[in-house]
Image: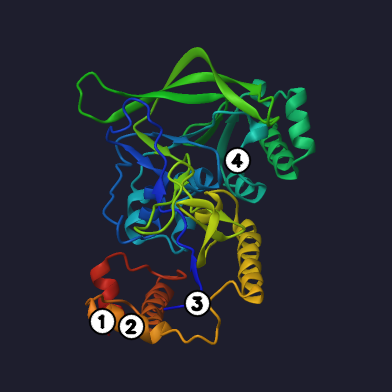
Amino acid sequence: MYHVVVLAYGSESDRALGVPGEDLSGIYSAREFVWWYNGHPDYSNLAPDLKSTDTAIILGQGNVALDVARIFLQPTSELETTDIANHALTSLEESSIRKVYLVGRRGPVQAACTAKELREILGIRDLYIHIQETDLLKSPADEEEMKNNRIHRRVYELLSKAAAAQPSHPHSCQRELHFIFFRRPDRFLDSDNSDGNVTGVRFEKTILQENGSTGKQSAVGTGQFEDIECGLVLKSIGYKSVPVDGLPFDHHKGVVPNNKGRVLSNDSADRFEQGLYVVGWLKRGPTGIIATNLYCAEETVASIFEDLEKGVLTPSTTPKPGREGLAQLLDSRNVKFVPFSGWEKIDLNEKTIGSLRNKPREKITTWEELLKVANE
């Protein structure tokens, strides 16, 4: 129906750790939790228990992990003026969580976050931040990594400064953020009464080992273990794209196989699917920030223009039914959809209600209500 189709649906699933106890209650993916507090209709009923424990462990030290930790630790008086979903705000107001562990397999030099996001969480008022001084020691390989990566250098500097500025112990009632490095989850723990709820995580201590072929440092286990107690775990270990029936997909890498955005055929690495392109995390995996996606999109668009000029695509003079043809097909299959005008009604409704509550918007969090507003 179109001369060109670009796949841009990103990553909406999660990687699994594959360690014992991963199915215990109280363990969620960070994606699920983010969708819960952002008002995604599929997760508005997630209802994580924030009252029964004072400690949460977040596995991962990327931007999503930091964002989740910030939601736990930031005063709700500041969150209430954002567009956070109302059900999440209510739950956070009643939360007992006062201590958050951010755990990573490698060291502070390799932390996957960016400086801006790290600065935001380090700037939370009256927050005690703990980092082991020994974890901040750098090896020659670390120095080399920092020399070649400005972001890693800045992140390390911010962590070092935060560690030096803290008192030796938190005062009573103070919320705590603990950066734990050189640990990888070995198993999730539950209580002897087998109620099925997570009570802690057993971690294996790691050291960094240089990979001779890539020069990168990988975390390897030492055979030493330690347990950290908690009542809630969030896995922020990476997103994963999902395949669409009939379209090429690399299940191992979790991406649509492509060359500069041109989708490669499943049956041949040398053949392209004519007129089919891909961008974003679906193209290169769940890494990078908005700026990374900008460059990624520009590369795909350049490929489209190049193929147009070379005559690789169906000539634009050949008519295609486009929007009208798609509308007819959807109608013949009785597929209902929300047009842009429906989205505009939702947008206006959320902003109008939000303005009455001193918020940018008050999100509608059920499909029923969303469709009702869109069809008014």
Among numbered discs 3 and 1, the one appearing first in the sequence: 3
Across the whole image, how many numbered discs are drawn on residues?
4
Q: Which residue is mark 2?
A: 327
Residue 156 or residue 121, whichever sits in front: 156
As helix, strand or loop, the secondary structure at mark 1 comes to: helix
| Amino acid type at mark 1 | Asp
Q: Quadrant of residue 99?
A: top left
The percent coordinates of residue 86 (x first, y second) are: 35, 61
Q: Which residue is mark 3?
A: 3
Looking at the rendered image, the quarter that the C terminus falls into is bottom left
| Amino acid type at mark 2 | Ala
As helix, strand or loop, the secondary structure at mark 4 comes to: loop
Residue 343 or residue 79, whichever sits in front: 343
Q: CA distance from mark 1 to mark 4?
A: 46 Å
Q: Residue at x 26, y 72 (%)?
A: 369
The percent coordinates of residue 146 (x first, y second) are: 75, 36
Q: Residue at x 58, y 60 (%)?
A: 261
Disc 1 crowd rating (10 Å Cα; few below 14, some 14-19, many 20+) is: few
The percent coordinates of residue 73 (x first, y second) are: 48, 44
The percent coordinates of residue 207 (x first, y second) are: 60, 19
Q: Which residue is mark 1?
A: 331
Residue 178 or residue 270, whichever sits in front: 270
Q: Is residue 337 above or below residue 226?
A: below
Q: CA distance from mark 3 to mark 4?
A: 39 Å
Cβ–Cβ under 8 Å for marks 3 and 2: no
| Amino acid type at mark 4 | Ala
Q: CA distance from mark 1 to mark 2?
A: 6 Å
